[in-house]
């Protein structure tokens, strides 16, 4: 198989061009065709010589993700199921709002971190995505939009743990935020969500300027370790100490995501402990009412319970928002991504088929970090 040209760094592409007597600036020309004009053929690259286009076509392929299906929610959210070259599947979610169009993308096929409330965890980790596969989610979804619409924000909150795929995620962020020859997103419009891999969090803040979101979900080590096994390696005290020490600019805050699980993590004592934990951290809290999925032991708190917990946190001076579920009717909401295919676009999602290479019959009621 030919190498995917999107997997080459600028330096690698410049080196390949230099070997053929081509000037270095050709690398940026090629990258603009790939990432800004979403070219799918070298023949489209009209400002390159025919000889160079032929050499590129002989040596490289241009990757694309295959859209296996897409589902549209009643609220306008669209979930895309993509098939990778090796047969694994991933999902991305496009979320329209009044002044923004946000795309939630995946960094892994499946997830190996085992969070108890998350359907993706039931898949286990199939593999990391290449940077090109992360970027191709943005390019492929962009192709479905009318000319007057464009994705305004990107969140790495889909399937998998981005910081467990650190190098490829970092390369993808570099391409997203490259104004000259990449996708040209401002770092302020890119957010990465992590379960709390402390060493990688420190590296991420040193090496990028993207927004950081921490999946917290509990206020004691006992509860958090039950919900999120990663807490046994990086317990709350270590995670929060890391967050407190990060050089977060004054205009920014760390977002702490907190899934509300009825009877588990939203007591008055939880509110008090959360306020104490986040003391001295430039923080805002996103409360996420649990989004049900097949096989889960958890349920969503009542609206009154959600509002009570929100008000208790606000009384401690915390900035707190409740995230309205988007796309939950098509299993596209937080915690529901499953890389799953169904026979009908609007049928029963409680049983779906999750295809793995060489296993076309595997069936499981699974599902998003």
Image (cartoon, grey):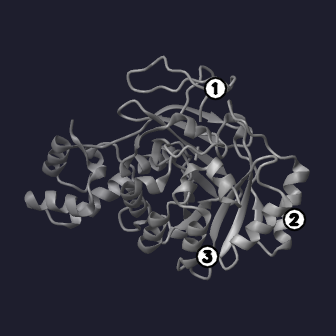
Cβ–Cβ under 8 Å for marks 1 and 2 = no
Q: Position of residue 306 (x, y in %)?
A: 84, 54
Apparent side of residue 211 relative to residue 289 in the rendered image (left or right): left
Report the Cα–Cα distance between label 2 and label 3.
Answer: 23 Å
Q: Residue at x 68, y 23 (%)?
A: 347
The dot on residue 345 is: 1
Residue 113 vs 217, above or below: the answer is above
Q: Position of residue 47 (x, y in %)?
A: 25, 57
| Residue 10 visible in image | yes
Determine crowd level at label 2: few under 14, some 14-19, many 20+ residues with C-alpha closer than 10 A. some
Report the Cα–Cα distance between label 1 and label 3.
Answer: 40 Å
The secondary structure type at the circle numbered 1 is loop
Q: Looking at this view, is 38 or 133 the one in front?
A: 133
Quadrant of the image containing the N terminus: top left
Q: In the image as oriented, which residue stretches furthest toward the right?
A: 304
Q: Looking at this view, is 134 or 318 the one in front?
A: 318
Residue that badge 3 annotates: 252
Report the Cα–Cα distance between label 1 and label 2.
Answer: 39 Å
Cβ–Cβ under 8 Å for marks 2 and 3 = no
Q: Which of marks 1 and 3 is nearer the N terminus?
A: 3
| Residue 151 visible in image | no
Q: Earlier in the sequence, mark 2 or mark 3?
A: 3
Q: Which residue is drawn at 35% across and 63% down?
A: 181
Q: Position of residue 182 (x, y in %)?
A: 38, 61
- Please tell me whether mark 1 or mark 3 is closer to you in this view: 3
Residue that badge 2 annotates: 311
């Amino acid at each position: 198989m030919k190498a995917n040209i999107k997997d080459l760094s600028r330096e690698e592409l410049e080196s390949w061009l230099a070997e053929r007597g081509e000037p270095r600036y050709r690398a940026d020309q090629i990258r603009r065709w790939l990432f800004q004009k979403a070219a799918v053929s070298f023949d489209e690259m009209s400002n390159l010589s025919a000889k160079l286009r032929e050499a590129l076509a002989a040596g490289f392929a241009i990757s694309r993700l295959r859209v296996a299906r897409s589902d549209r929610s009643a609220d306008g959210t669209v979930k895309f199921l993509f098939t990778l070259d090796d047969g694994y599947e991933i999902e991305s979610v496009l979320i329209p709002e009044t002044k923004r169009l946000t795309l939630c993308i995946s960094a892994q096929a499946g997830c190996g971190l085992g969070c108890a409330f998350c359907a993706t965890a039931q898949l286990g980790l199939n593999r990391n995505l290449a940077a090109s596969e992360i970027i191709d989610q943005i390019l492929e979804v962009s192709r479905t939009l009318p000319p007057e619409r464009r994705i305004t924000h990107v969140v790495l909150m889909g399937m998998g743990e981005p910081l467990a795929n650190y190098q490829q995620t970092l390369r993808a962020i570099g391409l997203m935020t490259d104004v000259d020859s990449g996708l040209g997103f401002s770092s302020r419009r890119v957010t990465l969500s992590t379960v709390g891999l402390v060493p990688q969090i420190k590296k991420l803040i040193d090496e990028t300027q993207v927004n950081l979101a921490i999946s917290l979900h509990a206020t004691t080590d006992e509860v958090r370790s039950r919900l999120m096994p990663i807490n046994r390696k990086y317990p709350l005290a270590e995670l929060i100490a890391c967050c407190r020490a990060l050089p977060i600019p004054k205009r920014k805050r760390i977002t702490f995501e907190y899934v509300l699980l009825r009877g588990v993590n939203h007591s008055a004592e939880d509110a008090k402990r959360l306020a104490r934990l986040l003391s001295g951290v430039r923080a805002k809290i996103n409360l996420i009412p649990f989004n049900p999925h097949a096989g889960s032991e958890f349920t969503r708190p009542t609206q009154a319970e959600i509002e009570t917990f929100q008000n208790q946190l606000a009384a401690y001076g915390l900035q707190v928002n409740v995230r309205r579920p988007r796309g939950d009717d098509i299993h596209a909401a937080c915690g529901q991504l499953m890389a799953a295919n169904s026979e009908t676009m609007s049928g029963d999602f409680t049983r779906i088929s999750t295809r793995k290479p060489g296993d076309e019959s595997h069936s499981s009621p699974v599902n998003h970090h």
